[in-house]
Image: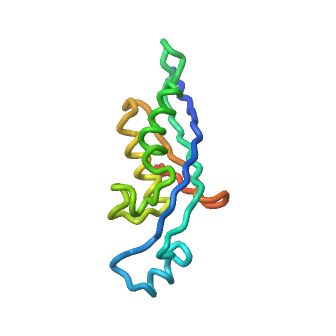
Amino acid sequence: MQEKRVAVFRKEHFNAAHRLHNPNWSDEQNKAVFGLCNNPNYHGHNYELIVQVTGPIDPETGYVVDLKYLSDLIKTHVTDRFDHKNLNLDTEEFAQLNPTAEHIAIVIYEKLKAKLAPQLDLKIRLYETERNFVEYPVVG
């Protein structure tokens, strides 16, 4: 009989400012590619984060993952680090990495995946706006 796997979700949010900019490009090229997101004075988003953990149900607890543990992980490694921060200026993660939604999702994934049991799969969905969001990883 195949092992049953269940997905559990935790939704959080954080507010952060950033500027999309490639230092190897001219100001004109940055403005052409990133538009308003290249504002030298930065701009902000109310990010909505959905963390999905998928795995087998532990026979002793009945959990895939303890949601309190997951909530604490997100608080420590995401919201405490990024909420009300300028991602370009206030975080080591984005000091040299363009803080696009794609990169933010990957950074969050790597921080959380390292703290989860290896049999658990992780997916990050990050909403930059109501209509713009990214997911990582993508299978297939």
Q: Is 33 situated left or right of 23 in this image?
A: right
Q: Is residue 38 above or below residue 66?
A: below
Q: Is 91 situated left or right of 17 in this image?
A: left
Q: Quadrant of residue 133?
A: bottom right
Q: Number of numbered discs present?
A: 0
Q: Is 99 situated left or right of 134 in this image?
A: left
Toward the right, the furthest residue is 130
Q: Is residue 68 above or below residue 40?
A: above
Q: Is residue 61 above or below residue 73?
A: above
Q: Position of residue 13 (x, y in %)?
A: 57, 46
Colouring scheme applied when the structure was drawn: rainbow
Q: Is residue 53 above or below residue 68?
A: below
Q: Is 31 situated left or right of 25 in this image?
A: right
**Which residue is painted at 49% across and 45% down in the image?**
79
User: Viewer-proximal residue, 133 or 120?
Assistant: 133
Q: Position of residue 2 (x, y in %)?
A: 50, 24
**Which residue is painted at 50% across and 83% down in the image?**
32
**Which residue is painted at 55% across and 63% down in the image?**
44
**Which residue is painted at 54% across and 78% down in the image?**
35
Q: Position of residue 105 (x, y in %)?
A: 47, 52
User: Viewer-proximal residue, 85 or 72?
Assistant: 85
Q: Position of residue 8 (x, y in %)?
A: 57, 32
